[in-house]
Amino acid sequence: MSNAGRPVQGQSLMVLGLGGVGMAALLVAIAHTAGWKRPARLIAVDMNREKLRRALELGATEALTLIGSYLGSAVPARDIPYYEQLWRDGLLPVEELLTGQRPLSEINLAFDELADGSSIRQLIAFD
């Protein structure tokens, strides 16, 4: 934690996953921030409630949980009309996610850019 993150006073710290390494990182974070004038936010994240409870006992200031979903846990017949209405009302600017447009012949390059994080969403134009 101190070597990789190099936290400084005023920052919040988050530990994702409270196995052996995560709990050790939390203890290091607690020790590292002990002398700070302003208490640090030390956020512990895990799916296991007992680990979250233990992290709070050890000194984490906040414990969230990690919730997974598959494809957004969507029910398309219900969700698509809802999100479409949000978009039509100007509340869901999905067009802001579009970072590029490529012809079908460059689809592999488009996927490479998604994989390396240099693109968020791309539109593939079929010729």
Image (tube, helix red, strand yellow):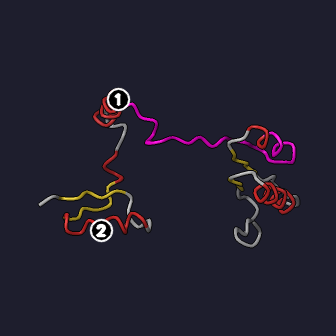
Of 86 and 15, nearer the camera is 15
Q: Is residue 62 left or right of residue 85?
A: right
Q: Residues within 10 Å of mark 2 (few under 14, many from 20)?
A: few
**x and y percentages locating residue 9 in the rendered image:** 76, 62
Q: Which residue is mark 2?
A: 108
Q: Quadrant of residue 108?
A: bottom left
Q: Name the residue at 30% across, 70% down.
A: 109
Query: Is 40 drawn above or below residue 105 in the view shown?
Result: above
Q: Earlier in the sequence, mark 2 or mark 1?
A: 1
Of 46 and 10, nearer the camera is 46
Q: Name the residue at 34% across, 64% down.
A: 111
In the image, which residues are magenta? 53-76
Seen from this angle, which residue lies furthest top? 78
**x and y percentages locating residue 98 in the rendered image:** 32, 55
Q: Which residue is mark 1?
A: 82
Q: Residues within 10 Å of mark 1 (few under 14, many from 20)?
A: few
Q: Secondary structure at mark 2?
A: helix
Q: Secondary structure at mark 1?
A: helix
**x and y percentages locating residue 12 in the rendered image:** 71, 55
What amino acid type should be assigned to the residue bearing mark 1? Tyr
Query: Is 123 drawn above or below residue 92 in the view shown?
Result: below
Q: Name the residue at 69% across, 47% down.
A: 45
Q: What whole-number distance in Å separates the C-alpha atoms at marks 2 and 1?
A: 32 Å
Which quadrant of the rendered structure holds the C terminus? bottom left
